[in-house]
Amino acid sequence: MWCNNIETGCNGCAPNADLVLLERAQADQPSAGNGAMLLVLCPHQNNFQMSVTVQGWQSRPPADRDQWQQVSEGRLEVDGRGVLTLSSPTTEPVDVTVPAGRYTVEISGRGFVNYGWPGSTTPGDVWRIRLWPYDGITKSAAQMWDMPGFGVPENTPAPVPAGEEEPAHGSSSATCTTTATATTRTTAIDFAAHPELQRRS
């Protein structure tokens, strides 16, 4: 999976805010935010050209989730500069002018071909960002792409900070020290194990 950031000015963000959001987005896919930044996971591992449309609405727009493969919502506060920055690890940031204020943000994507490597660096997926003034309504549940023959990738539990691990069975937390070992799990398809999913030339 790839990640894309939507920022509204992160001068006050913690130095590793994007990494923290990445862990949160992987633990509760497909996105996570902190009010100043919203990180969205994209099913494609590489995407060097991504079409993104940004729309501003006066209130929550009509639902059209049935036309999109992935949809999630978050909250952003646009500061007085009135700039929304779209960025991805492989592209230059793009600034979009947006009036200052607190917003609910809906990010929708479609045109996916695979979780992981999409077969090229320009797979052709398209995205839409809709913003409207935050109204206090609970955000709608995320919608994930259900890839034929694969399904939806599992969430990856966030790492446990050092010193907050569960004590070992039968030991006292005052005298026991445990070390958490991170497990790495990929959500990309193992084509050797699933030859039916390989593209035929």
Image (tube, rainbow, N blue to C red):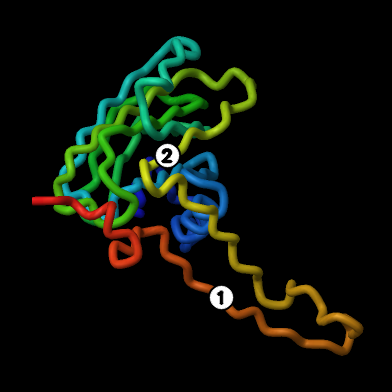
Dot 2, crowdedness within 10 Å: few (<14), some or many (≥20)?
A: few
Quadrant (top left, top right, bottom left, bottom right) of the N terminus: bottom left
- Label 2 sits on a secondary structure element that is loop
Q: Is residue 182 above or below residue 116?
A: below
Of circles 1 and 2, the one toward us is 2
**Residue 65 drawn above or below residue 90:** above
Q: Secondary structure at mark 1?
A: loop
Q: Residue 146 shows which numbered tag?
A: 2
Residue 182: image tag: 1
| Residue 32 or residue 68, whichever sits in front | 68
Q: CA distance from mark 1 to mark 2?
A: 27 Å
Q: Which mark is residue 38?
A: none
In the rendered picture of this protein, how many numbered marks are placed on residues? 2
The percent coordinates of residue 71 (x first, y second) are 43, 31
Is 165 on the left or on the right of 175, as rendered?
A: left
Q: Residue 10 versus residue 24: which sits nearer the camera?
A: 24
Q: What x and y, as percent, mark residue 95?
A: 26, 36
Q: Residue at x 48, y 25 (%)?
A: 101
Is 72 or 102 nearer to us in this picture?
72
Residue type (three-letter) at the residue carrying disc 1 = Ala
Q: Residue at x 40, y 31 (%)?
A: 107
Residue at image position (43%, 48%) is: 10
In the image, 162 versus 199, the foreground residue is 199
Residue furthest front as drawn: 196
Coordinates of residue 20 in the picture (x, y in percent):
52, 59
Crowding near pointer 1: few (<14 within 10 Å), some, many (20+)?
Answer: few
